[in-house]
Amino acid sequence: MKTHNFEQQTPEWFAIRQKKLTASHAQAIASAGKGLDTYVSELMSDYYSSGENENYTNKDMERGNELEPLARTMYELETGNELDEVGFVEVDEYSGFSPDGLYKEVGGVEVKSLNDKNHFQVILNGLKAVDKKHIWQIQMSLLLSKRVWWDLILYNPNFKKSLLIFRIEPDKEMQDKLLIGIEKGKEMIKEIEKKIAT
């Protein structure tokens, strides 16, 4: 496992992620079906294309990038957990993850800045109102890092309850599905490499 400290969303960050199954696509990986097929196909298309990376963005992602440093600082003040910022953790040639922060050798964090409607739903209903794809992402980060816990930090300054923190621990059932999907995904990547090489 190798840690890279360059900033996320930089050319170096995109380069190190090439050809790697990452936690941000954990839900597709865990499906080990059509979602994984589509993801691997897109991953390898980007890898072999000489064109510039088509980096998808939307309002939610832009808001998240803008608010993430503040959310991280507020989390540190609230919990006393001082986080190490990391660009990318390379697990092997075909997998890795981009933590929003790591805490010592035991924990990590994922920061999400939800829109008003979704943040309010979480205030009302707790963790069950959080999009499942975020939970899958955290489970894959836990699996690959072998850490004990991961805190999901939700931040939206438009509410009195602006900072919400949920501690997520490893879920064996979810991680078993991820292990199957990761192995299947790696085999698919190797198959494509062979086809291109011949």
Image (cartoon, rainbow, N blue to C red):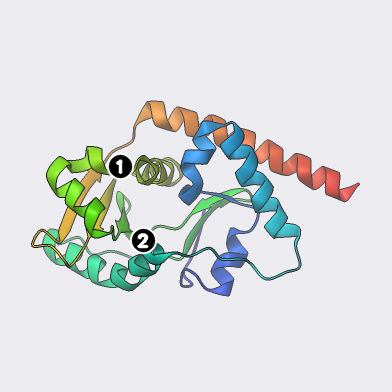
Q: Residue at x 26, y 50 (%)?
A: 151
Q: Is residue 10 left or right of residue 46?
A: left
Mark 1 lies on a secondary structure that is: loop
Q: Is residue 175 left or right of residue 104?
A: right
Pointer 1 residue: 148
Q: Using the image as rendered, state which of residue 157 and residue 26 is in the foreground.
A: 157
The x and y percentages for residue 175 are: 43, 32
Question: With respect to residue 171, does 62 lie above or below?
Answer: below
Mark 1 or 2 closer to N-term?
2
In the image, farthest residue toward the left? 160
The x and y percentages for residue 53 are: 64, 67
The x and y percentages for residue 125 are: 16, 40
The x and y percentages for residue 50 are: 76, 67
Q: Nearer the viewer, mark 1 or mark 2?
A: 2
- Say which amino acid is labelled 1: Val
Pointer 2 residue: 100
Q: Using the image as rendered, state which of residue 81 and residue 111 is in the foreground.
A: 111
Question: With respect to residue 19, does 30 lie above or below?
Answer: above
Q: Using the image as rendered, state which of residue 184 and residue 93 is in the foreground.
A: 184
Q: Using the image as rendered, state which of residue 192 and residue 157 is in the foreground.
A: 157
Mark 2 lies on a secondary structure that is: loop
Task: Give the label on residue 160, or none.
Answer: none
